[in-house]
Image: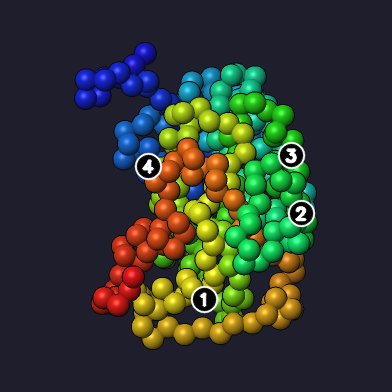
Amino acid sequence: MGATVNGSSEQAFKFLIYGRTGWIGGLLGKLCESQKIDYEYGSGRLENRDSLLSDIAAVKPTHVFNSAGVTGRPNVDWCESHKVETIRTNVVGTLTLADVCREKGILLVNYATGCIFEYDEGHPLGSSVGFKEEDTPNFVGSFYSKTKAMVEELLKNYENVCTLRVRMPISSDLSNPRNFITKITRYDKVVNIPNSMTILDELLPISIEMAKRNLTGIWNFTNPGVVSHNEILEMYRLYIDPNFTWKNFSLEEQAQVIVAPRSNNELDTSKIKQEFPLLLPIKDSLIKYVFKSNQKIDASAAP
Protein backbone atom coordinates (compact mmCIF):
# COMPACT_ATOMS: atom_id res chain seq x y z
CA MET A 1 0.00 0.00 0.00
CA GLY A 2 1.37 3.43 -0.83
CA ALA A 3 0.39 7.05 -0.54
CA THR A 4 0.95 9.49 -3.39
CA VAL A 5 2.83 12.64 -2.40
CA ASN A 6 3.60 15.28 -5.02
CA GLY A 7 3.03 12.74 -7.74
CA SER A 8 5.43 10.16 -6.31
CA SER A 9 4.55 6.99 -4.48
CA GLU A 10 5.71 6.79 -0.87
CA GLN A 11 5.34 3.83 1.45
CA ALA A 12 2.72 4.21 4.15
CA PHE A 13 4.45 4.06 7.53
CA LYS A 14 2.92 3.19 10.88
CA PHE A 15 5.09 3.73 13.94
CA LEU A 16 4.63 2.15 17.36
CA ILE A 17 6.43 4.22 20.01
CA TYR A 18 7.34 3.18 23.54
CA GLY A 19 8.15 5.90 26.06
CA ARG A 20 5.06 8.08 25.83
CA THR A 21 5.72 9.88 29.11
CA GLY A 22 9.40 10.39 28.40
CA TRP A 23 11.13 13.34 26.81
CA ILE A 24 12.24 11.68 23.57
CA GLY A 25 9.00 9.71 23.25
CA GLY A 26 6.95 12.89 23.48
CA LEU A 27 9.10 14.63 20.88
CA LEU A 28 8.81 11.64 18.54
CA GLY A 29 5.02 11.87 18.65
CA LYS A 30 5.14 15.58 17.77
CA LEU A 31 7.51 14.87 14.89
CA CYS A 32 5.21 12.19 13.52
CA GLU A 33 2.31 14.64 13.65
CA SER A 34 4.29 17.33 11.85
CA GLN A 35 5.39 14.84 9.18
CA LYS A 36 1.89 13.33 8.97
CA ILE A 37 3.18 9.88 9.89
CA ASP A 38 0.62 7.53 11.41
CA TYR A 39 1.73 6.48 14.90
CA GLU A 40 0.52 5.13 18.21
CA TYR A 41 2.08 4.85 21.64
CA GLY A 42 2.52 1.40 23.08
CA SER A 43 0.55 0.62 26.23
CA GLY A 44 2.32 -2.63 27.12
CA ARG A 45 5.08 -3.02 29.68
CA LEU A 46 8.40 -3.73 27.99
CA GLU A 47 9.14 -6.69 30.24
CA ASN A 48 5.71 -8.25 29.53
CA ARG A 49 5.99 -10.16 26.26
CA ASP A 50 2.27 -10.81 25.90
CA SER A 51 1.43 -7.10 26.26
CA LEU A 52 3.96 -6.24 23.54
CA LEU A 53 2.49 -8.88 21.23
CA SER A 54 -0.96 -7.41 21.87
CA ASP A 55 0.27 -3.91 20.99
CA ILE A 56 1.79 -5.12 17.73
CA ALA A 57 -1.31 -7.10 16.81
CA ALA A 58 -3.51 -4.06 17.42
CA VAL A 59 -1.29 -1.39 15.82
CA LYS A 60 0.28 -3.42 12.98
CA PRO A 61 3.36 -1.14 12.86
CA THR A 62 5.93 -0.98 10.09
CA HIS A 63 8.53 0.17 12.65
CA VAL A 64 8.86 0.23 16.44
CA PHE A 65 10.69 2.96 18.38
CA ASN A 66 11.89 2.44 21.94
CA SER A 67 12.65 5.52 24.01
CA ALA A 68 11.47 3.95 27.26
CA GLY A 69 14.07 3.27 29.90
CA VAL A 70 15.24 4.03 33.40
CA THR A 71 17.73 6.88 33.68
CA GLY A 72 16.88 7.70 37.28
CA ARG A 73 15.35 10.74 38.91
CA PRO A 74 16.80 13.21 39.47
CA ASN A 75 19.82 11.51 37.89
CA VAL A 76 21.57 8.18 37.31
CA ASP A 77 22.57 7.93 40.97
CA TRP A 78 19.03 6.60 41.54
CA CYS A 79 19.98 3.45 39.61
CA GLU A 80 22.70 2.64 42.15
CA SER A 81 20.06 2.00 44.82
CA HIS A 82 17.37 0.62 42.47
CA LYS A 83 19.30 -2.02 40.57
CA VAL A 84 16.51 -4.54 40.06
CA GLU A 85 14.14 -1.87 38.72
CA THR A 86 16.90 -0.67 36.39
CA ILE A 87 17.54 -4.20 35.11
CA ARG A 88 13.83 -4.85 34.61
CA THR A 89 13.39 -1.99 32.16
CA ASN A 90 16.84 -1.39 30.67
CA VAL A 91 17.81 -5.02 30.23
CA VAL A 92 14.83 -7.38 30.39
CA GLY A 93 12.40 -4.92 28.82
CA THR A 94 14.61 -3.79 25.95
CA LEU A 95 15.65 -7.35 25.09
CA THR A 96 12.06 -8.56 25.20
CA LEU A 97 10.94 -5.81 22.84
CA ALA A 98 13.80 -6.55 20.44
CA ASP A 99 12.97 -10.25 20.50
CA VAL A 100 9.25 -9.69 19.88
CA CYS A 101 10.02 -7.33 17.00
CA ARG A 102 12.41 -9.87 15.47
CA GLU A 103 9.78 -12.58 15.76
CA LYS A 104 7.35 -10.34 13.88
CA GLY A 105 9.90 -9.17 11.30
CA ILE A 106 9.80 -5.53 12.44
CA LEU A 107 12.69 -3.06 12.66
CA LEU A 108 13.27 -1.62 16.13
CA VAL A 109 14.89 1.78 16.56
CA ASN A 110 16.34 1.76 20.07
CA TYR A 111 17.47 5.02 21.68
CA ALA A 112 20.46 3.85 23.71
CA THR A 113 23.38 5.74 25.24
CA GLY A 114 26.93 6.67 24.39
CA CYS A 115 27.71 7.04 28.10
CA ILE A 116 29.47 3.68 28.02
CA PHE A 117 32.90 5.09 27.20
CA GLU A 118 35.44 7.32 28.92
CA TYR A 119 38.58 9.01 27.62
CA ASP A 120 41.55 6.64 27.71
CA GLU A 121 45.09 6.29 26.34
CA GLY A 122 43.81 5.36 22.88
CA HIS A 123 41.21 8.16 22.93
CA PRO A 124 42.76 11.02 24.95
CA LEU A 125 40.80 14.11 25.86
CA GLY A 126 41.43 16.81 23.25
CA SER A 127 42.82 14.41 20.64
CA SER A 128 39.73 14.37 18.37
CA VAL A 129 40.09 10.58 18.32
CA GLY A 130 36.58 9.34 19.03
CA PHE A 131 35.21 5.94 19.99
CA LYS A 132 33.78 4.09 17.00
CA GLU A 133 30.65 1.98 16.74
CA GLU A 134 32.63 -1.26 16.89
CA ASP A 135 34.66 -0.29 19.97
CA THR A 136 34.10 -2.16 23.22
CA PRO A 137 32.64 -0.03 26.04
CA ASN A 138 35.23 0.85 28.68
CA PHE A 139 33.15 2.79 31.22
CA VAL A 140 31.57 0.84 34.06
CA GLY A 141 31.51 3.60 36.65
CA SER A 142 27.73 3.66 37.04
CA PHE A 143 25.21 0.82 37.23
CA TYR A 144 23.11 2.61 34.61
CA SER A 145 25.99 2.51 32.14
CA LYS A 146 26.74 -1.12 32.99
CA THR A 147 23.20 -2.17 32.08
CA LYS A 148 23.29 -0.16 28.86
CA ALA A 149 26.60 -1.71 27.79
CA MET A 150 25.27 -5.21 28.53
CA VAL A 151 22.20 -4.64 26.40
CA GLU A 152 24.13 -3.10 23.52
CA GLU A 153 26.38 -6.14 23.34
CA LEU A 154 23.42 -8.54 23.32
CA LEU A 155 21.49 -6.48 20.76
CA LYS A 156 24.33 -6.94 18.27
CA ASN A 157 22.83 -10.39 17.69
CA TYR A 158 19.49 -8.93 16.56
CA GLU A 159 19.70 -8.02 12.89
CA ASN A 160 16.44 -6.07 13.15
CA VAL A 161 17.69 -3.48 15.66
CA CYS A 162 19.04 0.01 15.05
CA THR A 163 20.91 1.13 18.19
CA LEU A 164 21.36 4.89 18.55
CA ARG A 165 23.97 6.03 21.06
CA VAL A 166 22.56 9.29 22.48
CA ARG A 167 24.77 11.50 24.70
CA MET A 168 23.92 14.40 27.01
CA PRO A 169 20.77 15.25 25.01
CA ILE A 170 19.96 18.90 24.37
CA SER A 171 16.86 20.50 22.84
CA SER A 172 15.53 23.97 22.16
CA ASP A 173 13.15 23.57 25.14
CA LEU A 174 15.25 25.18 27.85
CA SER A 175 12.48 24.68 30.42
CA ASN A 176 12.79 20.90 30.28
CA PRO A 177 14.65 19.59 33.36
CA ARG A 178 16.08 16.67 31.32
CA ASN A 179 17.80 19.08 28.92
CA PHE A 180 21.56 19.04 29.53
CA ILE A 181 21.72 22.84 29.22
CA THR A 182 18.91 23.29 31.72
CA LYS A 183 20.65 20.92 34.11
CA ILE A 184 24.01 22.68 34.09
CA THR A 185 22.51 26.16 34.37
CA ARG A 186 20.87 25.02 37.61
CA TYR A 187 23.90 23.34 39.17
CA ASP A 188 25.83 25.15 41.90
CA LYS A 189 29.08 24.11 40.20
CA VAL A 190 29.96 22.37 36.94
CA VAL A 191 32.96 20.48 35.64
CA ASN A 192 34.43 21.67 32.35
CA ILE A 193 35.10 18.74 30.03
CA PRO A 194 34.62 18.50 26.24
CA ASN A 195 32.01 15.88 25.33
CA SER A 196 30.06 14.56 22.39
CA MET A 197 26.40 15.58 22.68
CA THR A 198 23.10 15.05 20.88
CA ILE A 199 21.03 18.00 19.63
CA LEU A 200 17.58 16.41 19.52
CA ASP A 201 16.04 19.08 17.27
CA GLU A 202 18.44 18.04 14.52
CA LEU A 203 18.97 14.35 15.23
CA LEU A 204 15.48 13.06 16.10
CA PRO A 205 14.17 13.80 12.57
CA ILE A 206 17.24 11.95 11.30
CA SER A 207 16.28 8.92 13.40
CA ILE A 208 12.89 8.84 11.67
CA GLU A 209 14.64 8.97 8.30
CA MET A 210 16.92 6.14 9.46
CA ALA A 211 13.85 4.03 10.18
CA LYS A 212 12.43 4.80 6.75
CA ARG A 213 15.74 3.67 5.23
CA ASN A 214 15.63 0.51 7.39
CA LEU A 215 19.10 1.16 8.77
CA THR A 216 20.27 -1.25 11.47
CA GLY A 217 23.29 -1.83 13.69
CA ILE A 218 25.01 0.54 16.12
CA TRP A 219 25.25 4.27 15.36
CA ASN A 220 27.01 7.01 17.30
CA PHE A 221 24.03 9.37 17.47
CA THR A 222 25.73 12.67 18.29
CA ASN A 223 26.70 15.79 16.42
CA PRO A 224 30.28 15.82 15.14
CA GLY A 225 32.94 17.22 17.45
CA VAL A 226 32.84 18.06 21.13
CA VAL A 227 31.76 20.99 23.28
CA SER A 228 32.62 21.75 26.90
CA HIS A 229 30.38 22.81 29.74
CA ASN A 230 31.95 26.27 29.81
CA GLU A 231 31.54 26.74 26.05
CA ILE A 232 27.82 25.98 26.36
CA LEU A 233 27.42 28.33 29.32
CA GLU A 234 29.27 31.07 27.47
CA MET A 235 26.76 30.71 24.60
CA TYR A 236 23.95 30.79 27.17
CA ARG A 237 25.30 34.05 28.56
CA LEU A 238 25.73 35.50 25.07
CA TYR A 239 22.27 34.62 23.74
CA ILE A 240 20.02 34.21 26.78
CA ASP A 241 21.20 35.87 29.98
CA PRO A 242 24.10 38.38 29.96
CA ASN A 243 24.20 38.30 33.77
CA PHE A 244 24.55 34.53 34.06
CA THR A 245 27.51 33.33 36.09
CA TRP A 246 28.78 29.91 37.08
CA LYS A 247 31.51 28.21 39.05
CA ASN A 248 33.66 25.28 38.01
CA PHE A 249 35.00 22.42 40.08
CA SER A 250 37.22 19.44 39.38
CA LEU A 251 36.25 15.82 38.77
CA GLU A 252 37.68 15.03 42.20
CA GLU A 253 35.45 17.67 43.79
CA GLN A 254 32.45 16.45 41.75
CA ALA A 255 33.04 12.92 43.04
CA GLN A 256 32.31 14.18 46.56
CA VAL A 257 28.72 15.13 45.69
CA ILE A 258 27.66 12.28 43.38
CA VAL A 259 27.23 8.57 44.05
CA ALA A 260 28.40 7.18 40.70
CA PRO A 261 31.11 8.55 38.38
CA ARG A 262 29.98 10.13 35.10
CA SER A 263 31.07 9.26 31.58
CA ASN A 264 33.10 11.78 29.55
CA ASN A 265 34.03 10.96 25.97
CA GLU A 266 34.13 11.82 22.29
CA LEU A 267 32.31 9.57 19.83
CA ASP A 268 33.44 9.20 16.23
CA THR A 269 30.65 10.36 13.89
CA SER A 270 32.11 9.29 10.54
CA LYS A 271 29.42 6.66 10.01
CA ILE A 272 26.38 8.89 10.53
CA LYS A 273 28.04 11.77 8.64
CA GLN A 274 28.49 9.50 5.64
CA GLU A 275 24.78 8.67 5.70
CA PHE A 276 23.69 12.23 6.54
CA PRO A 277 26.39 14.60 5.22
CA LEU A 278 24.49 17.76 6.20
CA LEU A 279 24.64 16.93 9.94
CA LEU A 280 26.01 20.03 11.67
CA PRO A 281 29.02 20.13 14.00
CA ILE A 282 27.96 20.36 17.63
CA LYS A 283 28.66 24.08 18.16
CA ASP A 284 26.92 25.10 14.91
CA SER A 285 23.94 22.92 15.79
CA LEU A 286 23.72 24.45 19.27
CA ILE A 287 23.59 27.95 17.83
CA LYS A 288 21.12 27.14 15.04
CA TYR A 289 18.66 24.89 16.87
CA VAL A 290 18.94 25.98 20.49
CA PHE A 291 20.35 29.45 21.09
CA LYS A 292 19.06 31.34 18.03
CA SER A 293 15.53 30.09 18.66
CA ASN A 294 15.70 31.15 22.32
CA GLN A 295 17.66 34.37 21.81
CA LYS A 296 16.65 37.03 24.32
CA ILE A 297 19.43 39.57 23.87
CA ASP A 298 21.27 41.16 20.99
CA ALA A 299 24.02 38.69 20.17
CA SER A 300 25.37 40.65 17.22
CA ALA A 301 28.85 39.83 18.42
CA ALA A 302 28.04 36.13 18.23
CA PRO A 303 29.52 33.98 15.45
Query: In the picture, residue 108 is in which quadrant?
Result: top right
Residue 37 lies left or right of residue 136; in this view the side is left
Q: Residues within 10 Å of mark 2 (few under 14, many from 20)?
A: some
Residue 76 in the image, given as x and y percentages of width and height: 67, 60
The front one of 220 and 225 is 225
Of tags 1 and 4, the one toward the viewer is 1
* Mark positioned earlier in the residue sequence (2 or 1): 2
How much space separates mark 4 and mark 3, taking CA atoms? 29 Å
How much space separates mark 1 and mark 4, taking CA atoms? 31 Å
* Mark positioned earlier in the residue sequence (1 or 4): 4
Pick out the residue farthest to the left.
Answer: 6
Query: In the picture, residue 118 is in which quadrant?
Result: bottom right
Residue behind mark 3: 153
Residue behind mark 2: 138
Q: Residues within 10 Å of mark 1 (few under 14, many from 20)?
A: some
Residue behind mark 4: 31
Q: Secondary structure at mark 4?
A: helix
How much space separates mark 4 and mark 2, taking CA atoms? 34 Å
Residue behind mark 1: 230
Q: Secondary structure at mark 3?
A: helix
Disc 2 marks which amino acid?
A: Asn
Of tags 4 and 2, the one toward the viewer is 2
